[in-house]
Amino acid sequence: MIALVMFLIDQGTKYLIASRLEMYEQIPVIGNFFLITSSRNRGAAFGILQDQLWFFIVVTIAVVAGIVWYLRKMTKEGRKLLPTALALVLGGALGNFIDRLLMGEVVDFLQFNFGSYTFPIFNIADSCIVIGVGLIILDTILDGRREKLNKLNTSREVSGTEGNE
């Protein structure tokens, strides 16, 4: 459900930008710090791998299949954070995949300026992917800590049992 909602928000915002703004037209939201800027990207993050459409299509199909398989596994185990993270990545991957498949490029529109530095323009799908990956990293760290605590508790139980015999 999370993946579907994020996909729909992503596609809806991209449709609004593509249909209502001219290319490179800007709407200031917070002065010069945050602008809505109509842009297109034929590559990946930060414009790398320009015009590698088939590469993106093949990689995205593989990634989506892997995420769907792993999501089903995690959901059965009753985990919460990791499935949410994977759903965000899935929704974002599908949002950019549809753009590439239908138009050969991705609609970007969120622009942030930090003084004279302009961060590469991105979209909702990109945000979902970044937040999802961040949550995957957080889940990995938390899972590692849980494992350490479980091993510590198990070793204390074992040594406590042996001392009572």
Image: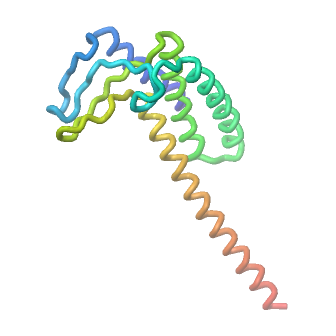
Q: Which residue occupies 48% across, 26% down?
A: 49
- x and y, in percent, of residue 41 in the image: 40, 21
Side of 6 where 67 appears, left or right: right
Side of 20 where 81 appears, left or right: right
Colouring convention used in this rendered image of the protein: rainbow
Side of 153 where 22 appears, left or right: left
- x and y, in percent, of residue 12 in the image: 40, 17
- x and y, in percent, of residue 71 in the image: 65, 37
Residue at the far right in the pictured view? 165
In the foreground, 157 or 37: 37
Q: Please say if 158 is above or below 21.
A: below
Q: Please say if 78 is above or below 51.
A: below
Q: Please say if 80 is above or below 99.
A: below
Q: Which residue occupies 54% across, 41% down?
A: 85
Q: Quadrant of the N terminus?
A: top right
Residue at the far left in the pictured view? 31
Q: Which residue occupies 36% across, 23% down?
A: 108
Q: Quadrant of the C terminus?
A: bottom right
- x and y, in percent, of residue 135 in the image: 50, 46
Q: How many marks?
A: 0
Q: Which residue occupies 70% across, 46% down?
A: 77
In the foreground, 58 or 143: 58
> Image quarter for residue 140?
bottom right
> Image quarter for residue 119?
top left
